[in-house]
Image: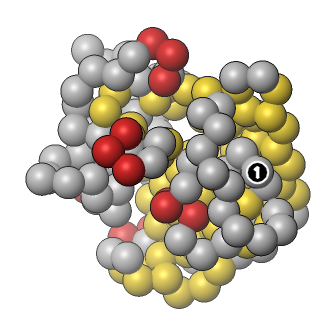
Amino acid sequence: MQAETHRLVIERNWDGGTITPAEKMDILFSLSDDQVNMNVDAPFYNDPPPPGARGEREELWKHKVAELFLLGRDGRYLEIEIGPHGHYLVMEMHALRQASRRITPLQCTTRITDSRWQGTLTLIASPDLLPFTHVNGYAIHGTGSNRRYLAAFPVPGKRPDFHQPERFMPLEKPSHNDRD
């Protein structure tokens, strides 16, 4: 299969509210056969990094992170998290918030340049998940009362909850998210 490339523009607060133009970020991802490539271009806020060396990190959502969710077959989905300091977490979910396994990426590289960061992550997805049909992307940054939760496609609720596959958008949509 030829690679399908999609672009998510994260330009809203998690609940649909506006964000500053400086907070806007892109997630470009491609899907080919069973390989997923994710590229992030985002503002860098100098938030404290997670403890420890680069690599897999639990609770990465407590730090600066970009997240890509891909819905597959039978309600299963893939959650991919990458942070500017080279930390990542990739989980295959067999049900809502129920991880069936972790996936080690083939590659994860990040680079911080002045006020922006870029990241690339490549992985092999389980054939049990394929094909991917829906998507959403998120970003988290800031600390304390300045904590911000952003989304490509907003989600309902009284507080941010990114595990809402019913709110993911179909991949057949155009490769960007200007639906309004």
Quarter holding residue 30: top right
Q: Local crowd at mark 1 within 10 Å, few (<14), some, or many (≥20)?
A: many
Q: Secondary structure at mark 1?
A: loop
| Residue tagged 1 | 85
Q: Amino acid at mark 1?
A: His
Q: Give the residue displayed 65% in from the left and 80% down from the top.
A: 102
Would you say residue 98 is visible in this rendering? yes
Instruction: Report x, y in % for residue 47.
Output: 60, 44
Instruction: Report x, y in % for residue 80.
Output: 60, 59
Q: Residue furthest left?
A: 158
Instruction: Report x, y in % for residue 172.
Output: 45, 35
Closest to the observer, 86 or 97: 86
135 to the left or right of 13: right
Total number of numbered discs in the rendering: 1
Closest to the observer, 102 or 21: 21
Q: Give the residue displayed 22% in from the left and 38% down from the top.
A: 15
154 to the left or right of 70: left
Image quarter in which the C terminus is found: top left
Instruction: Report x, y in % for residue 20.
Output: 39, 16
